[in-house]
Amino acid sequence: MQEDNESKEDLKLHVDEDWKKSVAEEKAKLREEDETHGQRPAPEQARPQTLPKPSMEVFLAGLWRQTLMALGEVESPITGKKEKNAVEAAYLIDTIAMLQEKTKGNLTSEESSYVQGILTDLRMRYVRVAEQPGKASEEQEGTQQS
């Protein structure tokens, strides 16, 4: 039995009492490295200061721009080319119309006018593009062959 007690004493674990302190120091060091090297911005730096405050107008302006790209009136930021996609343009216009219907009575008069103005503008542009079927279909065929 005495041998068992001696072997148990030999097997005692060494507990590092300073492990919490070490972990906290390591976290602080990593946080400092991330901030100085720009790998992971601090929460207050995570959002660029140049973004506008979220609003209905800003949201709709984004959909308007996407629709202009689908109509081939604005270059795609990805390809750098003007590409027409009438199906996507119609979908986006329908999406804006759906938002107008679903938010009816909940928008300010300025927001309502803004939605109506965007829809009128995009519908007119869509009609112009749709009236040029030869040119639009040639461009779509060209992008499909690429």
Image: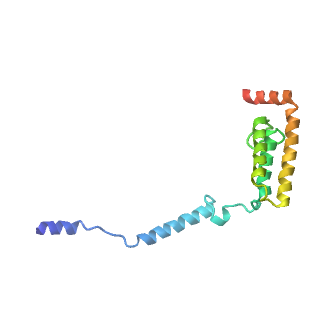
Which quarter of the image is occupied by the C terminus?
top right
As rendered, which of 5 and 106 lies closer to the eye?
A: 106
| Colouring of the image | rainbow
* In this view, 61 is above or below 135: below
* Rendered image quadrant of residue 111: bottom right
Left or right side of 84 for 26: left
Residue 118, given in percent of the width and then of the height, sits at 84, 49
Left or right side of 93 for 121: right
* Rendered image quadrant of residue 53: bottom right
**Can residue 24 be seen by looking at this rendering?**
yes
- Residue farthest toward the front in the current orientation of the protein: 105
Seen at 79% across and 59% down, the residue is 107
Residue 44, given in percent of the width and then of the height, sits at 66, 66
* In this view, 132 is above or below 51: above
Seen at 80% across and 56% down, the residue is 57
**Can residue 75 be seen by looking at this rendering?**
no
Residue 49, given in percent of the width and then of the height, sits at 74, 63
As rendered, which of 141 and 116 lies closer to the eye?
A: 116
Seen at 84% across and 47% down, the residue is 119
Count of residue discs: 0
Which quarter of the image is occupied by the N terminus?
bottom left
Left or right side of 140 for 39: left
As rendered, which of 136 and 79 lies closer to the eye?
A: 136
